[in-house]
Image: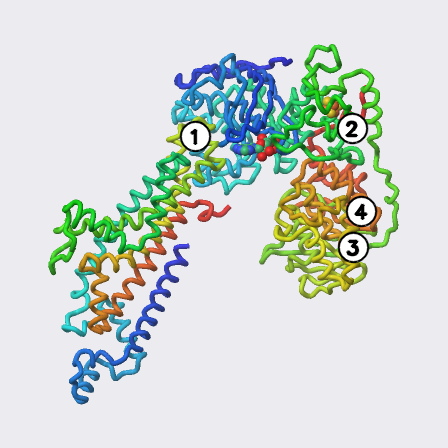
């Protein structure tokens, strides 16, 4: 299934003082029938996974949150989180089975023969110790001398691009940026020249530019040192670009695997296809297709295919026969396989091809919509204390229009939205909401002005009062902003719930009974219930899975059309901008550096900064969309 | 931080001296009356009041007392006209010996047992330790003192004296056997607090992502504990130890009276019985200063152990 491109690096052969016996580099990792479960309840989290990675090769593991990616990634180095156990299967590192090694032997392998890069280095680096001592430690515990360790650290810091950062070794983790912390974690993982590295979402939460550097670093180090790498991510675009081989995980099982170009170029499993349709493209404006339904609960005892309840091509046998991984196309060499009873059949390939072509461009019927300006921002400058954070912002949003405000973290996007909705008072300039001038603080604003502009926060978990039902949450703003009678209020609540596609039974539920996507819908409904003219959405999908994101985005698109809503859509995600916004403003260091129609800005960026953003996007020119199933 | 805390602490102590002074002004009678007793003639009373400065305004009296305090002269006792420092000095020293010994032992035991429980978390031993700590925390000191006395002195083993009345002028370390029981009681009282905080903080660090990560770097369990968990458990534990020392300053009054140990508690008790106002004022101010200083020291130590709070980005 794989081609080894590993090279023997001279560094491997020397300087480990014999502390590590495993030959490193050119290592092959084979996982057979690996099953991980919760020790107490025996509920299975990773189910019968078999997979192989060769030296110098990157295996991408993709799946949505809760699918078991992290558990699988950790299990591949023989580790389980507290409360979990490997109940079955073998992990062979150059033929040796890790599951049968004593703990002492494993300790010797960790950090030297195999290493782990955590998702969030902010919490995985020890806050009480300096970076230098944490880096040096991974070498010295494996018998590398202090002098040699220092030399190796100098070298690796150069390789991860941290050599220019002053005092990085004497800094504490909190003194570094997220990108720098992640590079420290990567430096640590590569320091001992391991044979196997597992990386768990190492670029989630990083800016595209930093993500680009980190991905390049990972790729070059893997091939330079012949490392077998496992890259776990929910980000299809990143995996498509980085990985040689891909495994798609759903409900703890691999549902499709093969070379990245095949899996993403001609996906066979309905789940993989659903995932790809939900991913927005930076190149073309498309409608995003959400998959119906939700993933099964852990330990769901239903027989048959786990994806059946959500599958558009399921047949009756899917509900009682469990599919196994079979080669696709049928009868091929098995380098590409899918766990589906139906898809690998010949007849359905035609049906699915048609299905894919329906993937459509958004009909831009309202692009030339009416040009009445609803929100006009002129020369807005904002400061925190004496520090000026926004400089002369000028923006306008028309009726029915979605204006995207893009920029990397810290560029001032959230500050601007907080100024607009009145949560931050330290600003000057002029803001007009359909010809009424708006004051900085909430307390001086007319009730009417407040009602006409509503705000949806980034984090749906923090923004909903956990002690109120959905119905109560939606009634609250109505009572505050309107004088509607009781019946009208209830009617309004119900129709808003319909608008965000939540069933009416949800009125009695509490936020913690809802999934992330449902909570975000409730948060949006709470903003919409008072029928605002402008909705300010701050990174409303960044905490959601792509398929859930797709449904929220499409819902916003429909609302914009049906309810004459103007949206200020704040995001760092350029493909999303392409999908939903008619206009875009690019922000950097508190200034708008470029704005205009979405297509013209993204296709032909003028500012150097915008050009860089576009260049640094993982280039997921989705083959499905461009060539169909050729 | 230190620069803010120290002036704040000084202001706190200063306010305490004012409150203490004001409170003693509210007591019925005055110092001259206390010295002369009930049979004092008005003439003698007036003469003594004048001699003691009691005829001056309260502000002037306060200022006289406070400036003396600043120069290290807390004045004279009303009882026998000795200076207060020579009168209470030995008792303060006795209490300090008890607090320091019990503080160090209690802390060491709490930290060590806490570490063991954290490593063996959820084992039967851990559960037993947790239950014991909780039981001890729910008992008042005097009950513990009675248990300890019954066990080690009067009924079961007859190892140590049940009364720790050091002879006047004797130093506590010359009579170690008398120190043992009060120390044991105080150790039993404080160790559970330290234990619980140490266990909680260590478990949190061990189960944190960086704790897990340290294992995946190839550190042994022991190395993870000592190099990664311990540095993060220091700050919360130091806070707990600080609280304990403060608590000791109060708890010691009970224990000293149970064992008739001549310490600050007893000195204060005597002073109150004698209506010895200057001595009361001095001892209360001393305790307040102890509170403030311990607070500052623990805050600073905890801060030093928490780079995230100490250093800017
Ligand atoms: N230590 C654990 N104990 C019990 N359940 C766990 C534990 N770790 C993970 N799980 C459960 O296993 C499932 C998969 O988790 P995880 O591997 O973290 O998925 P992913 O990384 O794909 O988001 C989730 O439902 C999660 O709640
Ligand atoms: S086995 Fe059936 S239900 Fe499962 S993915 Fe294939 S077609 Fe859909
Ligand atoms: Mg994960």
- Kindly report the distance in space between the C-alpha atoms of the residues bearing marks 1 and 2: 53 Å
- The reply to whether discs 2 and 4 touch (Cβ–Cβ < 8 Å) is no
Residue at which label 2 appears:
A312
Q: Earlier in the sequence, mark 1 or mark 4?
A: 1
Q: Nearer the viewer, residue B170 or A188?
A: B170
> Is residue B296 something that shows in the picture?
yes
Residue B147 screen position, x and y as percent = 24, 50
User: Can you tell which of label 1 and label 2 is closer to the viewer?
Assistant: 2
Indicate which disc residue A105 carries.
Answer: none
Distance, label 4 to label 3, CA atoms, is 15 Å
Q: Label 2 crowding class (10 Å Cα cut-off): few <14, some 14-19, many 20+? A: few
Secondary structure found at label 4: helix
Q: Is mark 2 within 8 Å of ligand 2?
A: yes
Residue designated by label 1 = A136
The chain carrying label 3 is A
Position of A458 relative to B171 (above/below):
above
Q: Residue at x 23, y 81 (%)?
A: B53
Foreground mark, 2 or 4, reads: 2
* Disc with the residue nearer the chain's start (1 vs 2): 1
Left or right, A625 with respect to A134, comes to right
Marked residue nearer the N-terminal end (3 or 1):
1
Q: Ligand 1 shows up in which quadrant of the image?
A: top right
């Amino acid at each position: 299934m794989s081609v080894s491109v590993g090279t023997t690096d001279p560094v491997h052969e020397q300087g480990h003082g014999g502390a590590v016996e495993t030959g490193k580099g050119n290592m092959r990792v084979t996982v057979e029938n690996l099953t991980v479960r919760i020790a107490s309840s025996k509920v299975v989290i990773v189910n019968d996974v078999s997979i192989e990675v060769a030296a110098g090769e990157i295996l991408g593991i993709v799946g949505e949150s809760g699918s078991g990616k992290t558990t699988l990634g950790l299990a591949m180095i023989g580790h389980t989180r507290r409360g979990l156990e490997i109940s079955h299967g073998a992990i062979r590192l150059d033929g040796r089975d890790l599951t049968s090694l004593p703990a002492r032997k494993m300790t010797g392998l960790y950090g030297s023969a195999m290493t782990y890069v955590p998702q969030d280095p902010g919490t995985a680096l020890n806050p009480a110790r300096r970076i230098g001592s944490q880096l040096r430690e991974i070498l010295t515990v494996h018998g590398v001398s202090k002098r040699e360790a220092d030399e190796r650290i100098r070298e690796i810091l150069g390789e991860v691009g941290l050599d220019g950062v002053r005092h990085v070794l004497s800094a504490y983790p909190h003194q570094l940026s997220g990108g720098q912390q992640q590079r420290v974690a990567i430096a640590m993982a590569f320091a001992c020249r391991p044979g196997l590295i597992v990386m768990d979402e190492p670029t989630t939460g990083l800016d595209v530019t930093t993500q680009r550097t980190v991905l390049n670093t990972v790729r070059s180090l893997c091939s330079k040192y012949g490392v077998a790498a496992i890259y776990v991510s929910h980000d299809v675009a990143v995996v498509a670009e980085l990985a040689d081989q891909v495994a798609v995980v759903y409900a703890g099982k691999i549902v499709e695997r093969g070379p990245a170009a095949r899996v993403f170029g001609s996906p066979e499993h309905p789940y993989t296809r659903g995932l790809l349709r939900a991913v927005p493209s930076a190149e073309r404006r498309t409608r995003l297709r959400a998959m119906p339904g939700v993933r099964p609960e852990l330990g769901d005892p239903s027989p048959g295919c786990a994806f059946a309840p959500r599958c558009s091509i399921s047949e009756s046998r899917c509900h009682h026969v469990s599919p196994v991984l079979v080669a696709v196309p049928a009868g091929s060499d098995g380098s590409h396989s899918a766990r589906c009873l139906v898809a690998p059949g010949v007849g359905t390939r035609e049906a699915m091809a048609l299905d894919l072509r329906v993937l459509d461009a958004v009909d831009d019927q309202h692009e030339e919509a009416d040009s009445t300006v609803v929100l006009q921002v002129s020369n807005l400058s904002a400061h925190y204390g004496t520090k000026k954070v926004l400089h002369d912002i000028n923006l306008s949003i028309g009726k029915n229009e979605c204006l995207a405000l893009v920029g990397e973290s810290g560029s001032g996007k959230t500050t601007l939205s907080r100024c607009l909705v009145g949560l931050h008072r330290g600003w000057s300039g002029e803001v007009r909401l359909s010809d009424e001038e708006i004051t900085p603080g909430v307390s001086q604003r007319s009730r009417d002005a407040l009602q006409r502009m509503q705000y949806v926060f980034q984090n749906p978990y923090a923004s909903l009062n956990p002690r109120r039902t959905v119905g109560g949450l939606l009634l609250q703003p109505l009572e505050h902003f309107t004088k509607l009678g009781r019946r009208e209020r209830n009617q309004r609540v119900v129709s808003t719930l319909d608008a965000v596609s939540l069933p009416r039974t949800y009125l009695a539920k509490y936020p913690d009974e809802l999934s992330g996507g449902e909570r975000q819908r409730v948060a949006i409904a709470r903003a919409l219930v008072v029928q605002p003219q402008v909705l300010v959405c701050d990174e409303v999908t960044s905490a959601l899975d792509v398929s859930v994101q797709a449904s929220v985005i499409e819902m916003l698109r429909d609302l914009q059309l049906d309810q004459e809503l103007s949206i200020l859509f704040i995001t760092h995600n350029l493909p999303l901008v392409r999908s939903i916004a008619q206009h875009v403003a690019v922000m950097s260091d508190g200034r708008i550096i470029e704005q205009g129609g979405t297509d013209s800005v993204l296709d032909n960026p003028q500012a150097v900064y915008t050009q860089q953003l576009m260049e640094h996007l993982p280039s997921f020119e989705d083959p499905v969309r461009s060539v169909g199933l050729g | 931080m230190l620069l803010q805390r120290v002036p704040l602490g000084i202001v706190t102590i200063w306010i305490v001296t004012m409150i203490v002074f004001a409170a003693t002004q509210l007591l019925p009678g005055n110092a001259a009356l206390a010295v002369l007793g009930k049979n004092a003639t008005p003439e003698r009373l007036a003469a003594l009041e004048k001699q003691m400065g009691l005829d001056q305004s309260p502000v002037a009296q306060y200022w006289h007392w406070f400036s003396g305090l600043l120069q290290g002269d807390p004045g004279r006792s009303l009882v026998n006209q000795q200076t207060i420092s020579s009168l209470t000095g030995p008792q303060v020293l006795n209490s300090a010996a008890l607090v320091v010994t019990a503080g160090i032992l209690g802390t060491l035991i709490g930290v060590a047992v806490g570490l063991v429980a954290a490593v063996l978390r959820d084992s039967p031993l851990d559960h037993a330790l947790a239950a014991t700590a909780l039981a001890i925390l729910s008992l008042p000191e005097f009950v513990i003192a009675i248990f300890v006395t019954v066990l080690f002195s009067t009924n079961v083993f007859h190892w140590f004296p049940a009364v720790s009345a050091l002879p006047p002028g004797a130093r506590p370390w010359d009579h170690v056997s008398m120190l043992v029981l009060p120390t044991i009681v105080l150790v039993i009282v404080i160790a559970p607090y330290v234990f619980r905080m140490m266990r909680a903080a260590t478990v949190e660090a061990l189960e944190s992502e960086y704790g897990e990560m340290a294992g995946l770097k190839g550190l042994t369990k022991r190395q993870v504990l000592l190099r990664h968990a311990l540095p993060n458990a220091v700050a919360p534990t130091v806070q707990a130890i600080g609280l304990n020392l403060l608590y000791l300053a109060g708890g010691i009054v009970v224990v000293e009276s149970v064992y008739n140990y001549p310490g600050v508690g007893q000195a204060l008790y005597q002073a109150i019985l004698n209506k010895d106002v200057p001595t009361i004022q001095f001892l209360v101010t001393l305790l307040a200063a102890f509170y403030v200083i311990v607070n500052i020291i623990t805050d600073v130590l905890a801060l030093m152990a928490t780079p995230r709070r100490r250093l800017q980005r």
